[in-house]
Image: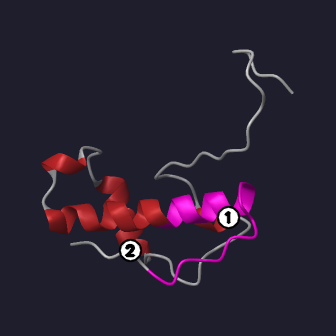
Amino acid sequence: HELADGKPERAGTYWTAQTDISKYKVHAPWSPSDPIFAAALASPTRLAALETRDQVPVIQAGYAFADAAMRSFVVPGAPPPAGAPKIV
C-alpha cells in the first residue's frame, strides 16, 4: 500500500491518555493503578512545567500505553517490561 505522501505504508500504533488500556490485545504484567491513570489524565501535557512528583503518573501511564500498543500491533513477540520505569 502507498500512503497519500507517496511513501510506503509502515507499521505503527496510536494511543492517547483516554485510551482504555484493556482494549489492547497485549498487556504487561505491570500496569499503573487506576488512580495513577486518573492522575495522568488530569495532568497538563507540559512535563517541564510539572514537579517531578506530578510527572511520575504521566510517565508511568505513557510507558504502559506505549508498551501495550507496541506489543499489540507492531512487535507482538517482544517481551514485556519487568516493571515501571525508574524515574530519578
Q: Quadrant of residue 54?
A: bottom left
SS of the residue under disc 1: helix
The disc, 2 or 1, on the residue closer to the chain's N-terminal end is 1
Residue at the limit of the structure toward the front, as seen here: 7
Query: Label 1 crowding class (10 Å Cα cut-off): few <14, some 14-19, many 20+?
Result: many
Q: Nearer the viewer, residue 54 or 42?
A: 54
Tell whether position 28 is magenta: no
Q: Are marks 2 and 1 in contact (CB under 8 Å)?
A: no
Q: Is residue 64 left or right of residue 45?
A: right
Q: Is residue 39 left or right of residue 33?
A: left
Residue at the limit of the structure toward the top, as seen here: 5
Residue of label 2: 85
Amino acid at pointer 1: Arg
Q: Is residue 24 above or below residue 30?
A: above
Q: Is residue 16 left or right of residue 53?
A: right
Identify the magenta region.
64-83
SS of the residue under disc 2: loop
x, y percentage for residue 88? 21, 72
Q: Is residue 34 left or right of residue 45?
A: right
Residue of label 1: 71
